[in-house]
Image: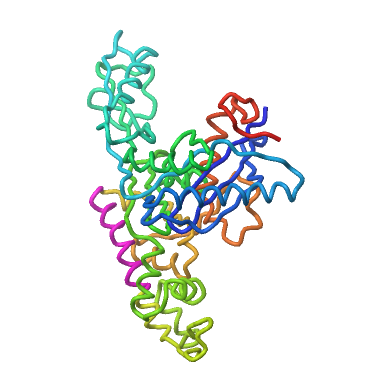
Amino acid sequence: MTSIHAALEIGTTRTVLAIGESEPGGRLKVTCHAEIPSSGIRKSQILDIPQATQSIRSVIREIERKQDAEGAKVTIGNAFLAVTGQHVKADPYFGSAQVEGARVGDDAMNEVLRAAHSMTLPKDRELLDVIEQDYALDNLAGIPDPKGMAGRVLRLNTLQIHAERNRIQNARTAADAAHLEIREPLFAVTCAADAVLEDYEKKNGVLVIDLGGGSTGHAAYTDGYLVSTGVIGVGGDHVTNDIAHAFQTTNAQAEGIKIREASAVLSIADNLQPRIKVELGENTLLDNRTISRRALDTVVNARMMELFTVIRETLEDQDLLHRLHAGIVLTGGGARLRGVEALAEQTLGMPARIGRPIHVDGLEDEEFPAAYATIAGVLLYASRNYEDHSILDGLFGRLFSR
């Protein structure tokens, strides 16, 4: 049976809603998606619930408008929610179990799994995901599958990803006011990674950097599983603000300059016009104002190098940088910035590429599919984990109707 799900991303710069439908062979098709500028959001957190609600209502109406134009009548009642921001944390945790009969059997495997999922969080935190890593048996570590092995004490290492409960509740409140139920909150960065990575990359070691508007998430994989993740409170909006402050423009003008002209590396400026015209709209008296391209790129380079340096130092402290043989994959709207791949390569010392969603159809016509990696990953998760619960079943209240 085909399963259909919806995904919601309430970002700093945009609110995105998408519908995905499972396809044969484990693929997913994004059948409809829409986005509108966000209101009431700063640094990936809701500061004004009524404004955030209005953003959600607007994007729902846009989805319905698109569906009506195609002759389909769809009402969205719930969605999976992508969560990001500095409040998201990841802590190591392990569960252990005694091995009976000298060899690891089903009982020990089940017991250690239950123990590894039993971490108690403070009341102000909400669990987003438990990442199962490797096993250890007595003094032998790094075991992918210990079943049948001899030993006395079995341990399963995990990474527990959790978020501030109130932040998620604010998103639920805003969505509820727009008559949209949040089914499950999911970590945006790992969703983006699942959408753009091949299994061999996770096994060989890879770093995903998800460049958002208000924050940047990173996730490192080795030996096939997630080993480190986090969110830094710096994103594309900070670059825009830097430009506006340095050249005394409005944020709208700075955003336009960033998208059209800016580069994260300085060398590109040598091949382009040395000065950039500032579009000032109705203020025709100042229409001839220009700024130095090299000065612009110096401002952008400083902020982006600072961001990549923080990530590099984090991975060095964890002794992970040298294990990422498959390089860097950049996702999110911020990955559209000219020269960002080159700067990531220079700063972190490994090859970088832009991550397009794989195993996903329906985004081919998008100018920059990497900006939809998170929403695609959320839909992939829903499709893979809720295959037997189509949104047409009516099992979860008012879901979709056609």
- For residue 70, side relative to residue 43 (left or right): right
Q: Nearer the viewer, residue 128 or 27?
A: 128
Tell me which secondary structure the magenta stretch mostly adopts: helix
Q: Position of residue 167 (x, y in %)?
A: 35, 43
- Please provide the residue range marked out in magenta: 300-318
User: Quarter of the image holding residue 153?
Assistant: top left
User: Quarter of the image holding residue 344?
Assistant: bottom left
Q: Nearer the viewer, residue 213 or 161?
A: 213
Instruction: Name the quadrant of the C terminus.
Output: top right
Q: Nearer the viewer, residue 204 or 91?
A: 91
Asked whether residue 203 is in view, the answer is no
- For residue 26, side relative to residue 115 (left or right): right
Q: Position of residue 139 (x, y in %)?
A: 22, 26
Q: Residue at x 31, y 26 (%)?
A: 156
State whether residue 4 is above or below residue 215. above
User: Quarter of the image holding residue 124?
Assistant: top left
State whether residue 236 is above or below residue 138. below
Is-magenta flag for residue 310? yes
Q: Residue furthest top?
A: 101
Q: Residue at x 38, y 58 (%)?
A: 214
Q: Position of residue 87 (x, y in %)?
A: 31, 46
Asked whether residue 58 is in view, the answer is yes
Is-magenta flag for residue 369? no
Q: Position of residue 7 (x, y in %)?
A: 54, 42
Q: Nearer the viewer, residue 294 or 84?
A: 84
Color encoding of the figure: rainbow
Q: Residue at x 55, y 39 (%)?
A: 380
Instruction: Name the quadrant of the N terminus.
Output: top right
Question: How many marks do you count on the picture?
Answer: 0
